[in-house]
Amino acid sequence: MKKSMLLLLAGLFSCAAQAAVSGYPVVLVHGFQPDNLQSKPTGAQVSNNGADYWAQYWRDRADERIDWPSQERVADKITSQYVWPKLQQMSRDGTCANGCVFVSHSTGDLVTRYIIDNQALWLQNAGLQPLNIVATFDFAGAGGGVELADLAVNVANGSGLINSAVKLAVSLWLGATPSSSNIGVLNDLRVNTARQLASFPDSRVPRLRFAGAGSDFLGTTGAFLPGEDDGVVASHSSCGAASASGYNSCSRSVAFDGKLTSVSGPSAFMPYHYPMLMSEGYSHNDTIGSSAKDEVTTANNSSAYLNGDNIKFTAYDEKRGWWIFSSRYRVVSNSERTSMSSLVYQAAN
């Protein structure tokens, strides 16, 4: 009996130690879930969907999740019915009292930006302690908007230039053709709308970006996305660029495949947005998965948290090719066999 109890306690302490980065509790904010537009989940189903969303890698490495339904709007029911109650709970529990890290994916990037811009005032007005968010890890971030959302809203409303190619791209992404009664958070994801939502937060929380340039749709959706994209989000958004444009990298000197060369990258970024890892072979959902998909490179190999702590990635440069046809590439160590999420988690610890 004593031995089994000790093993149980050891397991509990092991899980507790794992559910943090550098000792900071991890809070997950998931992204857009297309099936929600039809199923319209509420209550426990929203939580179940949130758990399933992160199942591959981050769920068991997190302390809290903020789950929300995609059939609603960010500044409306997503905040009032799902975000706000969770913020109050975390404040009362002291989850972020000594600092915490938010991990977001896709539209979770936009939801997190809205939280960062407002949570301190909301909680202070409620007589509660604001959350001490020291950094966010944003995978395939959609905070700069998604061109496919503009197309989806046009298809749903029967406006704009709509043809079979547009409908195919939208249906591949959503799994169905949208209607005006079920577009929900897609309204917030339109490029101009997203970029106006909490675009200049007072908080200086560093938004660390991790981007891919692969696709699960054989390039069909990419035809409607400017520059490099991950099949859903264009690089201007995932990199955190200050403006929406056709960028081919998060860096002006390193390509998505790690080649050290002059490349079309952003010259300015949204406030406190810092691109970190990139990879040509990771699609939108691969970035939060548990499998290695391709070598990973760095737009920047280190960055500081709000409190001065650092995250740093180890990378090396190598020559590929022969003679005058050779080029140099930058590769994150062990990335050929380690998933992007695992690289981030390991570096943070």
Image (cartoon, rainbow, N blue to C red):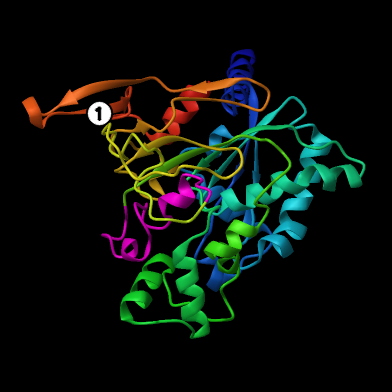
Q: Residue furthest right?
A: 127
The residue shown at (55%, 70%) is 37
Q: Secondary structure at mark 1?
A: strand
Residue 162 among magenta residues: no
Above or below for 13 versus 325 = above
Residue 281 placement, left or right of 1: left
The residue shown at (42%, 43%) is 211
- Front-lying residue, 212 or 4: 212
Question: Residue type at mark 1?
Answer: Tyr
Residue 210 placement, left or right of 124: left
The residue labelled by disc 1 is 329
- Front-lying residue, 64 or 205: 205
- Across and down, in percent, residue 334 comes to 32, 23
- Front-lying residue, 58 or 205: 205
- Across and down, in percent, residue 81 comes to 75, 59
Q: Quadrant of residue 258?
A: top left
Above or below for 329 versus 67 = above
- Across and down, in percent, residue 70 comes to 59, 63
Q: Residue furthest bottom?
A: 158
What are the residue bounds of the magenta stretch? 215-242
Label 1 environment density (alpha carbons within 10 Å; few <14, some 14–19, many ≥20): some
Where, quadrant-wise, is the N terminus in this rendering?
A: top right
Q: Is residue 322 visible?
A: no
Dominant SS of magenta comes to loop
The residue shown at (67%, 60%) is 74
Above or below for 263 versus 187 = above
Residue 230 among magenta residues: yes
- Across and down, in percent, residue 79 comes to 73, 57
- Front-lying residue, 270 or 47: 270
